[in-house]
Image (tube, grey):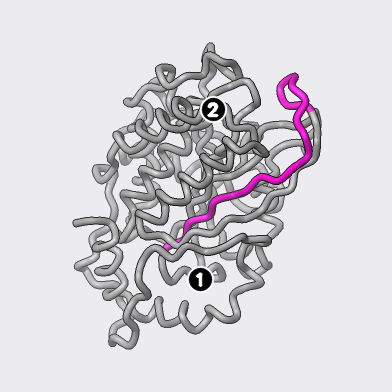
């Protein structure tokens, strides 16, 4: 079954959620991401008025085996091979963001673009201008941001000199493959998928990076903030044979649940404490639960050598399976 067909089946199966969403459509703007440039509605509006609040058993829960690793590999080749370096304010970044937005839309998600303003600075030794980047935000049809949900994201930008296959086309590739697997299937909570702009540093301090994820968190109304039950950032997830599971401090509830999911999926994983070098930190520093997957060191880091051949499909698969085990209903 195609993803849109599965979504239509899901829409028919969960009418009450969708009716609630339809009712809240006019009042939900304060909780929408700030500065959105437009909305692409990929799926037809679901039918309303059916009788049951219970999701039909017909809607199958997502499983680790639903992952198509080839989707992630294709994304890595396109972003790091065909597009190449994509510093957050460049036309190349914009092409990458448009491509990711089209992919989410084709999978059946509602897609919004959120503007991210960034200052001039220095990124890994290269001067970068002030300008505008963007987040690509994908929500399932009928999504209500004030109800409990999960956020899964990966940064789409690179430092100016790197094609960024591992950092971080790998993360975006797994996010898109997991979104594809989850489309129209049951997850334990609704999932928002985000490709973040401008994660890479433009200066030396803790406020000089992670602009896209900070803009996302700052744009959440307090009810939507309370509804974020866990955030996972995928950042450098295609190198190695073990998956680092990072927490901003000693440990984090999201980190512990990811480690448990790794055990269920049979994926080797190791805790990675004091890990603040990715977009989960924007959530944690605002009081929300968050963790990171990935960070194994590699030779091509932030260089012209960060090409698709660096990324190992088997590791993309491990991370995708781990994440789907985390999203699956228990
Ligand atoms: Zn990165």
Residue in the picture at 55% in, 29% down? 272
Please say whether residue 283 is visible from this viewpoint. Answer: yes
| Residue at the image position 66 percent from the left and 72 percent from the top | 30
Q: Within 8 Å: ligand 1 and the Cβ of disc 2?
A: yes
Which residue is rendered at x = 58% and y = 44% of the image?
A: 196
Total labels drawn: 2
**Residue 1: which quarter of the image?**
bottom left
Between 307 and 301, the residue placed more toward the observer is 307
Residue 195 is labelled as none
Alpha-carbon neighbours of circle 2 within 10 Å: few (<14), some, or many (≥20)? many
- Which residues lie in the magenta part? 122-140
Mark 1: C-beta under 8 Å from nearest atom of ligand 1: no
Residue 42 x %, y %: 39, 63
Task: Find residue 198 and report its horizontal and vertical position in percent.
Answer: 66, 39
Q: Which numbered disc, 2 or 1, marks the residue that appears first in the sequence?
A: 1
Q: In the rendered image, which residue does mark 1 sit on? A: 144
Q: Is residue 136 magenta?
A: yes
- Say which residue label 2 marks: 167
Q: How far apart are the alpha carbons under marks 2 and 1?
A: 31 Å
């Amino acid at each position: 079954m195609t993803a849109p067909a599965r979504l239509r089946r899901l829409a028919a199966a969960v009418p009450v959620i969708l009716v609630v969403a339809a009712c809240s459509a006019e009042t939900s703007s304060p909780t929408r991401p700030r500065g959105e440039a437009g909305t692409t509605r990929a799926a037809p509006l679901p039918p309303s008025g059916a009788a049951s609040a219970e999701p039909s058993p017909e809607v199958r829960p997502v499983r680790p085996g639903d992952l198509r690793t080839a989707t992630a590999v294709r994304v890595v080749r396109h972003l790091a091979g065909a597009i190449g370096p994509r510093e957050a304010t460049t036309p190349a970044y914009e092409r990458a963001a448009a491509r990711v937005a089209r992919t989410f839309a084709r999978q059946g998600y509602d897609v919004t673009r959120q503007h991210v303003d960034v200052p001039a600075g220095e990124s890994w030794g290269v001067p970068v201008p002030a300008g505008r980047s963007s987040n690509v935000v994908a929500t399932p049809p009928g999504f209500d941001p004030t109800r409990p949900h999960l956020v899964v994201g990966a940064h789409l930008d690179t430092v100016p000199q790197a094609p960024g296959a591992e950092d971080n086309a790998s993360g975006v590739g797994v996010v898109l493959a997991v979104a594809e697997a989850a489309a129209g299937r049951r997850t334990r909570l609704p999932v928002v998928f985000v490709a973040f702009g401008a994660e890479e540093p433009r200066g030396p301090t803790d406020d000089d990076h992670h602009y896209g994820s900070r803009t996302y968190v700052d744009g959440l109304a307090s009810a939507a903030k309370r509804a974020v039950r866990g955030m996972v950032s995928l950042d450098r997830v295609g190198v190695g044979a073990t998956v680092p599971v990072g927490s901003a401090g000693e440990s984090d509830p999201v980190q512990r649940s990811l480690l448990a999911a790794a055990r269920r999926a049979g994926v080797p994983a190791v805790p990675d404490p004091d890990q603040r070098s990715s977009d989960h930190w924007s959530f944690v520093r605002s009081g929300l639960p968050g963790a990171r997957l990935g960070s194994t060191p590699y030779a091509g880091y932030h260089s012209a050598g960060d090409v698709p051949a660096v990324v190992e499909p088997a590791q993309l698969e491990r991370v995708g399976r781990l994440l789907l085990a985390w999203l699956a209903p228990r």
